[in-house]
Amino acid sequence: MSEQSVTPTAASRTQTNNLLRRDVRFLGNILGEVLVHQGGRELLDIVEQIREQSKALRADFVPELFDQFKETISSLSPEIRHQVIRAFAIYFQLVNIAEQNHRIRRKRDYEVSAGETVQRGSIESAVKDLKDRNIAVTDVKEILSGISLELVMTAHPTEATRRAVLDIHKRIAEDVMQLDNPTLTFREREKLKEKLLNEVLILWQTDELRDRKPTVIDEVRNGLYYFDETLFEVLPNVYEELERCLTKYYPEEHWHVPDYLRFGSWIGGDRDGNPSVTANVTWETLQLHRQLAIRKYEEKLNGLMDLLSFSTNLVTVSDELLDSIQKDREHVELKCVELWRNASEPYRIKLGFMLEKLANTRDESLKGTPMRYNHPNELREDLLVIDRSLRSHYADYVADTDLAKLVRQVELFGFHLMALDVRQHSKEHENAMAEILAKMHIVSDYAALSEQEKTELLHKLLNDPRPLTSSHLDYSESTRECLDVYHTIYRAQQEFGENCISSYLISMTQAASDMLEVMVFAKEVGLFRKEADGTIRCSLQSVPLFETIDDLHAAPGIMKELFELPVYRKAIESRGNLHEIMLGYSDSNKDGGVVTANWELRVALKEITAMAKAYDVKLKFFHGRGGALGRGGMPLNRSILAQPPHTIGGGIKITEQGEVLSSRYSMQGIAYRSLEQATWALITAARLAKYPQQEPAAEAEWDAIARSISETALTKYQDLIFRDPDFMTFFKESTPLPEVGELNIGSRPSKRKNSDRFEDLRAIPWVFAWTQSRYLLPAWYAAGTALQEYVQNDAKKLETLRTMYEQFPFFRSLIDNLQMALAKADLLIAKEYAHMIKDQSIRDRIFSQIEEEYKLTSKLILSITGQDEILDNVPVIQESIRLRNPYVDPLSYMQVQLLSELRDLRANEQDDPVLLREVLLTINGIAAGLRNTG
């Protein structure tokens, strides 16, 4: 290609890719220096030998070289092997840092080279699209008032990075970013290299493994880390950009965008299967949320104190400001803050009183007094007093920037920072209800009642104002804890506002009674009240979580039954005719396989939405996606656009699982881009819902085809997972499942019960173990057979699937997710894991079945997409996987060797903590190498 034919954009893209390679090489060389410094030249030579052999095998698989490669690994002494594992694992940490930095660089590079061109997927592109389609400002306002996205952090930390390691990563990332600074002198670059060498050395000497399981409060603090470091600043920046674009394209309107984008959390509220999450822990969590919010406001007010040095010797401030200062003098006693002594600087005097009131907000004994802020609106109003005064003497710039941003932060975060959801298993509620009703002699065995009898009884109890519980009765510990949670929610709403906890999620919702039990408990503490005139006051919504395939089938009927109960319907009306429903991607996938789970979720979304529309109820769907492909994982913007547009009318919630938090929110630039793309997707989806495109004439036919493919896939998947008596043996012995539970990455047990049953295994370790062993089976298995069963070597049917891939968004998303899974899987390495299975007949039979399905799925995907290789349509990801594999492979082979040795020891009732530690290090390393693994 001649130089003249290279566009500036293509040339700059090549240049930025070269910069990524520069950063990876630079960090790799620094790691090499650290290896020599710490382990001598011998350590570096061994690491390089293994790396070169692994790369050569990936380039051209030669059996003799493969044997040499395995011999090199198996001959390592335990001491050297330990260091080699850490070398590869830390290398991935550094590569991940370089790639994250590169994402920020690419965006900046685009903005520099594009000039006036609007970047695809940006907020401006969404607003410009509205303008280009001649959508009137009134309709734009309607779209914006109707969109809602809440991102909910969960404590599923299968990306097992410690806080200490995250801090090191952040410092390395900031230093590497400085390499792009063209003004650095030669000496400054040398000092930067010395600093990075020191940081990598610190990383090498920092233990990446926790010596104990984190407590729930540890997990809470880990989640708050992202608010402290990025989200508190980035979230209002997204709003600011949206308002800038709206003003640019619709200048006739003064824009203040409604609060459409928020964060929530399960951490400290999710007690399903985690006995460590108690009512006291939930209360402590809420206090930590408030403490961080107040501290961030104090930082901001102190910053304003530096800025707002305006003097009444030069400007005239508003009488409103002076009156508010006088009112503060009368009511606020300064203890924490000294009064600003320069009387001619009134803004600083006002800010001093505001800082005192903020400090007093921590003190519950001052509740209700003017000594503190009793509601965030009071803080907001003080800020607006300052805003109006600033504008009165033409200090608009500071009002439009620093002050406006702080006002937005108060609107977004209040004093509760983010909403906390409470979640509990439906069986826990039933057990508590049975005990309470028996003690009150209402029914001796509630659990034995039919579903109709339970529903009728609970409906009657909701209409009855009399209490069910008494402080004079003794309850079991589990029932007392169940009741304490509701008392804590009531207390929290009184102290932090109703928005701090308003959703109570019910795992394994299988009947209307599961929902009504929560409402009856809410009534006991005043969260649900029926007034004398019949009106209902309800500040807590019971939210069903439909998880399994059977639950998804039952969901429309369950919700219909509830909507027809008069007292429940009035409770919905009291909450604006909006009802939240959660759909679980993990358990439906574990239960029915990836093809069927995706299909059944689509069907459930449509059927529940249609049913609710008949009752004039708006729905907010809560999508429980994981980070891994086998748990519904995909980029945030794609997960929004994957929903049928008409199903997002009441808003949307999506889980942000622990394993994706650091990759999405540890750096401000990446956090901003992720939330910007989410906003673009949200506005785009809302436009499609308001102005629906005509469905292709063939969509009904395509739905029927997808349904038949799903039915075949379900049979194929369950034949192996549920009906093969040897499957669990294969799974446990050919993956590191038993050892994953020994990695101290979460406070919650890996099983709901102390049971070896497949049904009691959580979806997270299920997917994590398959990913570690490179099968990635939950993310693709049964798809090939299902597609082949439809095609049957019929060229016309294959052409139909190709058309569906081009024109049917659901099918395209499914096929592309299958591609990603197939690309990350590696059955050559998986076969090494299979060698750990003791019974050769089980190993050979099941592995050959999996291998055959993998080949068939790959073949069908390539036929449908017309590609030569998997992921040809996403060359950037294809290349990233290709470059990472040679570095992940050695860790996989070492993991197999270590697992074999450890299990042999344990079979003889012996153990080796050093050996276990090495296994856990390989788990961490493979997780870092493959990313989004659980």
Image: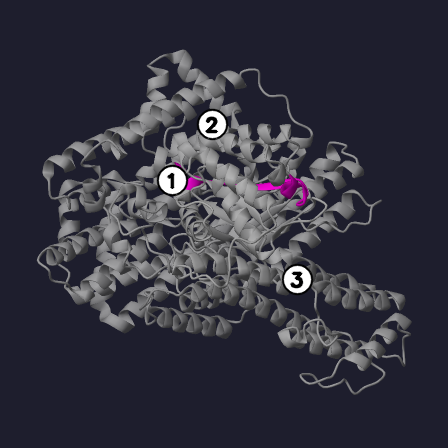
Residue under label 3:
414
Q: Position of residue 763 (x, y in %)?
A: 36, 45
The quadrant in which residue 35 appears is: bottom left
Residue under label 1:
448
Q: Is residue 153 visible?
A: yes
Q: Position of residue 863 (x, y in %)?
A: 38, 23
Mark 3 is on which residue type?
Gly
The reply to whether discs 3 and 2 touch (Cβ–Cβ < 8 Å) is no
**Disc 2 versus disc 1: nearer the observer:** 1
Magenta stretch encompasses residue 193: no
Q: Residues within 10 Å of mark 2 (few under 14, many from 20)?
A: many
Residue bounds of the magenta highlight: 570-588
Q: Earlier in the sequence, mark 3 or mark 1?
A: 3
Q: Which mark is residue 811?
A: 2
Up-down: is 565 above or below 322? Answer: above
Magenta stretch encompasses residue 574: yes
Mark 1 is on which residue type?
Ala
